[in-house]
Image (tube, rainbow, N blue to C red):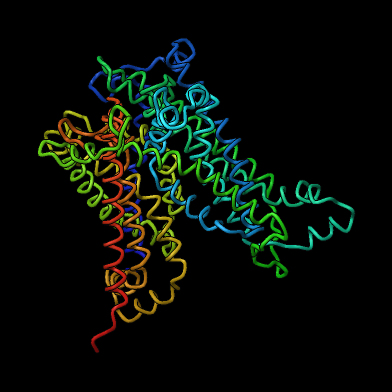
Amino acid sequence: MKPLLAENRTGWLVLAVLLLLILLPLGAVIIQVLLPGVFFGNLVFGDLSLLLEVFRRPLWLASLKNSVTLGVGTTITATLLGAALATLRSRWTFPTAKLLDLSVWLLIITPSFILAQGWVMFASANGLAKQWFGWTWLHGLIFQPVGLILVMTLSKFPLAYLTVYSALEWKVDQFRDAARLNGGSPWTVWRTVQAPLLFPAYCSGAMLVFMDTVGDFGLPASIATVFRFPTLPYSIYSALYTSPIRFDMAGVLSFYLVLLIALAMIVQMFAMRRARFDFLSSRATKSEAVRPRKGSVGLAVGNILFLGVVIGIPVGSNILMSFTASSGASLTLDHYRKLFMNNSVLREGFTHSLEIAAVAGIIGLIVGFLVAYVLTYSQFALRRVIDVISLVSLAVPGVVLGIGYIFIWNQKWLDSIGLLLYGTPWILVLASVAGAIPVITRIIVGAMAKVPGQLLSAAQMQGAGFIKRLTTILVPLLKGALVSAGLAAFGASVFDLAVTSILFPPNFMTLPVVINKAFEDLQFGYASAATIVGGGLVILIIGIVERLFKRKHNAPSSS
């Protein structure tokens, strides 16, 4: 009974933490719409007609339309592009193919606002494209809805690429061979056999692209400097930083943003239920890319040109602009000198971001480890609920989570018990933990699946208590996964623009806020230099920590 009691206590503890960090702020956004002012001492039964105001107020309606347009357009194009590249990459190998794999991961881990800033600096009216190549037409092409869909597509296609590429890991050739023996052309075979079998992967990739696109705050925040294209996340942010503060607007727009994501998840569940194919059998073989009989050079050249656009423009523009004088006529190191001046805010912002990310990474690692344990080994009755809640934070945009934290932690009565966290760095820590939990949990769950439960049972039979089993068996066996999960959470927290832009306390700058504010003030060179230095230092810290861990982990025993 004692082991079961310990597991149940852990389950209830984990559930309580997830409710506090994730579900309660999300519920607060919905409650604010139904009961306006309830979180500020003014209980009024809501008029649901406020939800219909989105169709009568121009800015609200434009934000909703733009988010839907950007989300649907990017979902279609990014899914098609990602699926096509994944299919090509799984079938053929060619020179520079590894660069495509590396670039996909680079695009995933690079914050969207940095990629968007690179495109702005390249394609703006007086950007690098005009200065270096004389391309005056590019500004008109990019800064319109179709152009923004193109930019977002080149940033989000890796989500569909990885999803489809993973589904292509195994193949069953008898289906294809049977179709070809019956006279089917290669196109007919792909359309009638392979594509339907991969339909669930396409749906999963499309849902990831849609959720990440409609909840993206970085692109509209960067584009706003040169082109007015309000979206739901950016308008929510604007509602909190106008005078007077528009909590009604933020609440309603957050409701519709959550509704869009919920609808996407429902559509995916419906499609997956109607298109389930269990086709792997003992005759399945692992897919191996082969060198094509001809066209290998063409694939390599095409890949280089493609990567030159998707990586070279956003990343290269940041690097080049950081060395370009404000006049654009010469190269200079002035922007880097400004970063290290005595009155530079970069050091302060970078230090704050590191402190928040480090604390959030440690707390998130502890919570994520316990969540993973409950999901993997316990018989807790509500572990399915815990799994769903841990994924909700991955789907809910940072701006929605941020406004929910304002509603919850900006209560006067919390001051009397010392928990008025709004306006303090601790609210950034909590929000960062909430965002890190799903990533940490997925990494650790995958590693825990390889550790047999019998090891824990054997230790239990030898009298080891719950904490003893965790610290002496699971932690040593999962050291690599724990470090990877912690570093992933750390890196993501440092560059979380959405949460820090909404929740950062007065006179408490963070690295992404410093970069974004410099960009909004059209200090492109300074913003680029801050991005390069900040990103480089974060990568260096992660590399050092990982190397120290590996060296310690692999060191031979003194015995």
Image coordinates of residue 206 in percent, x first then y, are: 57, 41
Camera-side residue: 559 or 342? 342
> Is residue 33 in view?
no
Image coordinates of residue 35 in percent, x first then y, are: 35, 21
Q: In which quarter of the image is residue 353?
A: top left
Q: Which residue is drawn at 45% across and 11% down?
A: 58
Q: Which residue is drawn at 15% across and 37% down?
A: 344
Image coordinates of residue 39 in percent, x first then y, are: 26, 25
Q: In which quarter of the image is residue 524?
A: top left
Image coordinates of residue 151 in percent, x first then y, are: 50, 33
Q: In which quarter of the image is residue 43?
A: top left
Camera-side residue: 545 or 238? 545
> Is residue 210 in view?
yes
The correct choice, above or below, for 104 with respect to 270 in the image is below
Q: How many numbered circles does the render carry?
A: 0
Q: Is residue 545 left or right of residue 253?
A: left
Q: In this view, does 265 lie to the left or right of 216?
A: right
Q: Residue at x 34, y 47 (%)?
A: 492
The correct choice, above or below, for 255 with respect to 293 in the image is above
Q: Which quadrant of the rendered structure holds the C terminus?
A: bottom left
Residue lying furthest bottom in this view? 559
Q: Which quadrant of the rendered structure holds the N terminus?
A: bottom left
The correct choice, above or below, for 477 with respect to 444 in the image is below
Residue lying furthest front in this view? 330
